[in-house]
Amino acid sequence: MSLYHEAAALLTGPSTHGGSLKSRVFSNKDLKSPPAQVYALALETCKWSAVLKEVVENAELLKHERKLTPILSILLVHDHLLAKGGIALPVSHGLRQSIDRHKARLTSEFTKARIRRKCPTIDTFRDLIESEHAGPVQHPRWIRVNAVKSTLDAQLETTFKGWELVPSITEVMTAGRKKKVMCLDGHVPSLIAVPPSVMDFSKTEAYKKGEIILQDKASCFPAYLLDPRPEDGDIIDACSAPGNKTTHLAGILSERGFARGQTIHAFEKDRNRAKTLQKMIKIAGSDAKTVVHPAEDFLRADPQSEEYAHVGALLLDPSCSGSGIVGRDDVPELHLPEPPANNKGAGGSNPKNANKNKRKRPEGENTTKPPPSIMVDDDGETTVVSSEKDLQQRVEALAAFQLQIILHAFEFPHAKKVTYSTCSIHAGENEGVALKALRSEVARRRGWRVLKREEQVRGMREWHVRGELEASEGDRELAEGCVRAYRDDGRGTMGFFVVMFVRDGTVDGEKQREEVDKEGPYVRDEQGRIVRDGNGIPTLKATGMKPVEAEEDEVRFGSGSDGEGPFVRDQEGRIVRGVDGMPSLKKPGVVNVEEDESESDDDDESGDDWSGFDD
Ligand SMILES: C[S@@+](CC[C@H](N)C(=O)[O-])C[C@H]1O[C@@H](n2cnc3c(N)ncnc32)[C@H](O)[C@@H]1O
């Protein structure tokens, strides 16, 4: 099969290889032509297809060359007019001859198409097509500063030195793809947004050293919402690879100070993905505090095991449909020329020829039946989905697995906090699963409930996109407790969902323990005063351990390299921040949140208050 037939089949036929155009090409093991060549031809032809359609129709190419299909005609005409080496076929090849015979007419129609678009040269014509294809910037590049290795201040003075600070995500998205502008996120601490193609951050020193991590804003929600603290004990990340959220957990804890012996258990069922996880954790500098469980199924981890006796919080980010991921549907729009009215394909208008020389066409070419769409899970599984029913069945299967993960997490004896997240937009994987989890026997037995919006950390409380009320079956508290994000809504995130479950431990036989603990979690002397060591560190009743090692005691928000910059500083020159680490900007009227629907609870920081180690 020629390069052109392969590209034609890829663009118009059904595919079992799914995903973006790129992944469909590069995962297709049946291709005979070099995948990079097929990809470039298919992509470029799509970009130019509106022009090529015009050229082919006006030159009446399909009327004269009855054996050419519309898709083959634009692929060949693309290379004839625009590729450096022309059509990649021998001069004697029938397909090439079918174009060469009409050279003059095609070139003349192409020139007319250029002039109609007011482009004086072919280069300006190329620029125009490129810019049309690029479209408006919908998704900025999000960069999380890894608190284990760096600080926001340090990054502002190195990686982002000389960049212009703009107040909102809208300015980042409208600044142009190459302008060095940045915005500090108003919801997640130490998160920066920049235009998507401003530079290749993976080549920066900061990235190579693990000081910055490229992570979508919404993907930062789960670890931030879980709000891990030294007193939470060990944390489980149940579905970890590649490790964005695992390293985020470590970053937050390192700012607060890990408790002595406090560990993050990172499970990853897939052996290969576990290797990626291990690499990421090492580069991010969190390997010392993380125990990776490679090729281990979280569902097989025994909640009663001694190893997990101190687990107080779990982050669950299981496999999902991935329907919220940006870039999944990047197949450019394809414009095909109309075949002449009486040309019903190869064989032309003569009914006798209808089946003669007829190449079996890829399904979908010149037919009205749309090719089936492909669902690619966020861990790479593909499913051909040709009907609503297929989609529903796939979502139901994923939801059943996701529910199992939550119910298993609910069984860990000392767990008090669980976040559940997906990068799916389907309610069946989101509010639907959360509802079932809350109605489960284990939730009722152990007192699990949803963390209300007003109890959430400030950035999540102030995020305005909440769960779907209908999908929450009218349960307003659940819908408000759920945090959603949608792509293409101007907020610059991927599609995402997260909810947090909490329990206070007053049911499930823990009441007695809580009674004993009503004076707080720390050991007290006979006068009721908290017993502290020489560094002022109290000892936890539950574990007999210090919540924070003395040498890791420092809370590092506000530290880092100082100097002049856009932020308010205190007398010692340190950047002044809110309790959640958000820096205050100097410029009057400049706010570093993109929402204008500000709420009246700005000064109510109670849910997000890190007030040291006192009880
Ligand atoms: C959505 S991805 C996790 C992304 C990750 N949390 C991050 O932020 O980088 C889901 C991962 O969970 C893994 N996984 C699925 N089921 C699992 C299970 N039962 N136990 C452990 N890992 C599982 C998959 O192999 C996949 O790597």
Image (cartoon, rainbow, N blue to C red):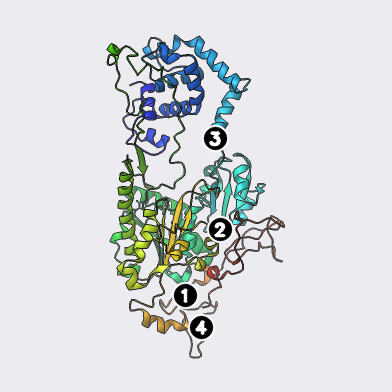
Q: Is residue 368 above or below residue 208?
A: above
The answer, for residue 570, to whether it is visible in the render is yes
**Are the residues tagged 3 and 1 within 8 Å (C-beta)?**
no
Q: Is mark 1 within 8 Å of ligand 1?
A: no
Residue 134 circle label: 3
Question: Which residue is the site of mark 1?
Answer: 546
Q: Earlier in the sequence, mark 1 or mark 2?
A: 2
Picture coordinates of residue 399, whole percent (x, y): 33, 55
Picture coordinates of residue 180, whole percent (x, y): 63, 43
Q: Amino acid at mark 4?
A: Ile
Q: Amino acid at mark 2?
A: His
Q: CA distance from mark 3 to mark 1?
A: 54 Å
Work out which residue is located at the far front of the displayed protein and give it: 341
**Are the residues tagged 3 and 4 within 8 Å (C-beta)?**
no
Circle 3 Cα neighbour tier, 10 Å, few/some/many (<14 / 14–19 / ≥20): few
Q: Earlier in the sequence, mark 2 or mark 3?
A: 3
330 and 545: which one is in front?
A: 330
**Are the residues tagged 1 and 4 within 8 Å (C-beta)?**
no
Residue 512: image quadrant is bottom left
